[in-house]
Image (tube, rainbow, N blue to C red):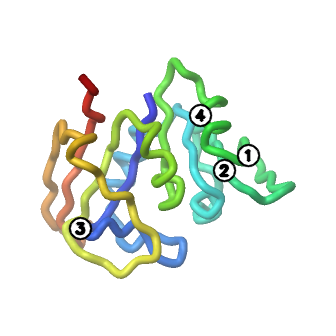
Amino acid sequence: MVIMIAATAENNALGKNNDLIWHLPDDFKRFKFLTTGHHIIMGRKTFESFPKPLPNRTHIVISNQENYAPEGCIVVNSLEKALSIAPKSEDVFIIGGGQIYQIALPFTDKIELTKVHEKFEADAFFPELSPNEWELNSEEFHPKDEKHLFEFTYQTFLRKRKN
């Protein structure tokens, strides 16, 4: 199954200047829990926003730069190539950024979204989800607390089956 995982604001903001806009420790824990042991597909800028490769995951980085070869990663020049490398019998996670989410949407079966209940200025955005294509399957609300400056909701969307 191809699964997108992202945290977005109410205005679909993802980030600014190649960085996240908010810090939600519980969301980081959820991301780690869901993606550990799996292939993760991302764009070069998203990969470069990490201090180092994320442990216990196979990194597939999409880049058009020739000779781009960060240690511990598989580098490809297209989403189709990235998906062909990932095992068909396992979940594979699309983890960003904005351009990768946009091109991966037609290939995606499920979306694990953290909706941050604020609007932010950003330069990267998550694509708009069509209610004709996507169905909200579950959600779990989290209020603000001492570790989280914003309210947020975990949402799971499934692609609607075509009749």
User: Which badge, 3 or 4, comes first in the chain's sequence?
Assistant: 3
The residue located at (45%, 70%) in the rendering is 124
- Viewer-proximal residue among 57 and 134: 134
Q: Residue at x 15, y 47 (%)?
A: 140
Dot 2 falls on a residue whose secondary structure is strand
Binning the other alpha carbons within 10 Å of mark 2 as few (below 14), some (14 to 19) or many (20 upward) gives many
Comes first in the chain, label 2 or label 4:
2
For this orientation, the residue located farthest to the top is 89
Rounded to the nearest angstrom, the CA distance separating label 2 from label 4 is: 11 Å
Q: Nearer the viewer, residue 63 or 33?
A: 63
N-terminal label among 2 and 1: 2
Residue at which label 1 appears: 75
Residue holding disc 3: 10
In this view, the residue in front, 111 or 36, is 111
**Please, which residue is most extreme toward the bottom here?**
121
Q: Which mark is residue 83?
A: 4
**Three-letter residue code for mark 1:** Val
| Rendered position, 84 above or below 15 | above
Q: To which residue does mark 2 refer?
A: 62
Label 1 crowd bin: few (<14), some (14–19), many (20+), radius 10 Å: many
Circles 2 and 1 in contact, beta carbons < 8 Å:
yes
Amino acid type, mark 4? Leu
* Measured Cα–Cα span from mark 3 to mark 4: 29 Å
Is label 1 in contact with label 4 (beta carbons under 8 Å)? no
User: As drawn, is 107 to the left or to the right of 39?
Assistant: left
Compared across the picture, whether 5 is left or right of 117 comes to right
Where residue 158 sits: x, y (%)?
A: 27, 35
Q: CA distance from mark 2 to mark 1?
A: 6 Å
